[in-house]
Amino acid sequence: MSSEGASGKPPARPVRASSAPPWASGDLVSDLLHEAEAAWPTEAAGFLVMQRGDHADEGRVMLRPLAGEASSVSFRAHPTAVLNILQAVEETQAQIIGTYHSHPDGAEAWSVADHDWLWWGRWHALMAKRPEGWMVSWWTVEAAPQGGSAVAAGTEVSGGARAE
């Protein structure tokens, strides 16, 4: 993945959403928190995949974790892991609607390398390890008008419950 397009810039910038996406169920948030905790003290990352077509789970969003090289401040997906997920998505008529990754060091800000996640979908869940537990923040992007900046529309979630 490269964070630069033909213009030399990512497709948009991440913006913290004002509310969680409508498909972000409590089960999905629990799964995100589980992924982050299971990978701790290294980063976890993967795709948010919505099932489509004639499938019993149509409309349900599921995690598709990526295998890769991880540290406490970086994640690099194995190319074959990405290809395997893309093939499974196509075979099941699913759609990648976003990505997720964790920051076990607690950082809630995006690094330059994190912008690579923006190529895969409109939504991103960022899990940050805080003293009181994992926090999930939802980020979104909308393609910027030519020459403009990205604008957005998620919610921070802690331990599976929405924080207001």
Image (cartoon, helix red, strand yellow):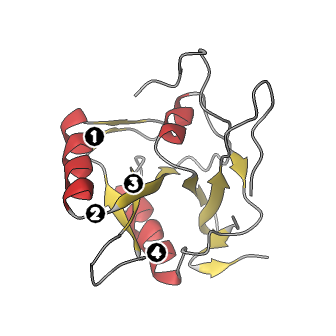
Q: Is residue 9 left or right of residue 1?
A: right
- What residue would you read off at disc 4? 28
Does label 3 or label 4 sit earlier along the sequence?
4
Camera-side residue of 14 and 110: 14
Residue 114's spot in the image, x, y percent? 54, 36
3D distance between C-alphas at marks 1 and 3: 13 Å
Does label 1 or label 2 sit earlier along the sequence?
1
Does label 4 or label 1 sit earlier along the sequence?
4
The disc at residue 68 is: 1
3D distance between C-alphas at marks 1 and 2: 25 Å
The disc at residue 93 is: 2
10 Å crowding of disc 3: few (<14), some (14-19), many (20+): many
Q: Nearer the viewer, mark 1 or mark 2?
A: 2
Does label 1 or label 3 sit earlier along the sequence?
3
Q: Secondary structure at mark 4?
A: helix
Q: Is residue 90 left or right of residue 135?
A: left
Does label 4 or label 2 sit earlier along the sequence?
4
Residue 19's spot in the image, x, y percent? 73, 69
Camera-side residue of 146 and 137: 146
3D distance between C-alphas at marks 3 and 2: 15 Å
Q: Nearer the viewer, mark 3 or mark 2?
A: 2
Camera-side residue of 71 and 61: 61
The disc at residue 82 is: none
- What residue would you read off at disc 3? 47
3D distance between C-alphas at marks 3 and 4: 12 Å
